[in-house]
Image (cartoon, rainbow, N blue to C red):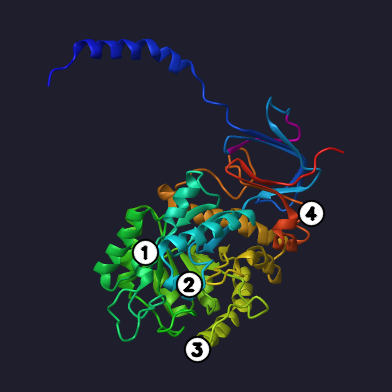
Amino acid sequence: MKLNTGIFISALVWLILSAPIFATEKAPPPPMTLITNASIFDGVNADLATGMSVLVEGNKISKVAKSIPAPAGANVIDAKEKVLMPGLIDAHWHVMLSEPTFPELMSSDAGWLTLLGARGARDTLYRGFTTVRDVGGNPFAIKKGIDKGMIEGPRIYPSGPNITQTSGHSDGRHPAEPETPIYLEHQDHLRIADGKTEVLKAVRQNLRMGATQIKLSVGGGVSSNYDPLDVSEYTFEEIKAAVDAAQSWNTYVAVHANTDASIRTAIEAGAKSIEHGFLLEEDTLKLMAKEGIWLSIQPLLNDEDAFTFTGENQRKWIQVTDGTNKVYKLAKKHNVKTAFGTDLLFDPTLGPKQGKFLAKLKNWYTPYEALKMATSDNAELIKMCGPRDPYPGEIGVVKEGALADLILVDGNPLENLDLVADPDKNFVVIMKDGVIYKNTVKQGP
């Protein structure tokens, strides 16, 4: 085919002459928000800094000072001495599993479940949780939609499908068809892998999907039917294979486990985060403190907000929640690195109580300790994913250079932790990544 030289030269001349026009065009300036007259809980220190101003440029906090002149065009919010704090972080959340009931999860098509998950993600953000660590499921489409600004929701640090052994936690296959994959496997919420080779492949598949950390079930669970709580799942060699695969991607393994035996094997194999741990004994908690292993436990109690089970699963629920009080007290006594999460599953009425579960920490911690746990402490755990982090920048703090995740609270949560249980009423501003999603502050005298 002959090149039409005349057309080519004309097009080239047009591009050259047009280049200065495109080069001199400027992108619109990033949005700026100035919050004045705020009392700041920075996520780290116990004392409020009063009479402070915070300037947000783009998605970061650019300045924190006593007085900041309002830049031209900035959106100015007078906090009127309300408490400004970091966005909350839930370190044990399931984006795709919190909204549907279990029968709905097992019988609905992927499109409907994604719509439910998107609704739940939006509601999570409007409860003040600007970041979640998803520890089992397939939230990748929702995460992508949030990151592209198509839908509203928190930052998601996904583990990908929960990895479990045959007969392990989350193995819900029919007894008469033990080799037939179930719906959760088809939709990439679950992987069943046995032996080092299959475990290696499962971990690598999750990392290929975009997992920021890996979740492995290594002990019995409440909601699953084939594994009593006392059983240890996966051998040392299998867990070590998962850890090695994760470490080769410069990230870590979190494990579902409750008992000393399963947790000690996981620690020996290199796991860095223990999810649940309701049946831990003091010596193992001492070991965790010594080795810097995280305890990602949830404030689950057999109270008015108890999860609903039947038969043997209900008995297991009572057994684990009977251990909640003991483990929290021992973890605090020995300064175990402790994260806050909720693990609210299979019940759309539980999600709205996410803040209420945070408030339950007052059974063991001061409001300051609880809020620090749900902000800067959780951020430390989440950022262990290193270069797999899809959101570089500090979270869980109010400081210059940090990502602009902020909540303005009508009241002082350092004095009354129950304020976080009613975000609709008490969170008057919610910002994530510099974007204001809620602002009900009344301006003027």
**SS label for mark 3:** helix
* Visible residue check, residue 128: no
Q: Position of residue 245 (x, y in %)?
A: 31, 59
Q: Residues within 10 Å of mark 4 (few under 14, many from 20)?
A: some
Q: Which residue is mark 2?
A: 104
- Total labels drawn: 4
Which residue shows up at 56% across the image and 85% down it? 319
Residue 298 in magenta? no
Q: Which mark is residue 188?
A: 1
- How far apart marks 2 and 1 lie (CA) works out to 16 Å
Comparing labels 3 and 1, the label whose residue is closer to the camera: 1
Which residue shows up at 30% across the image and 67% down it? 199
Amino acid bearing label 1: Asp
**SS label for mark 4:** loop
Tell me which label, 3 or 1, sits earlier in the chain.
1
**SS label for mark 2:** helix
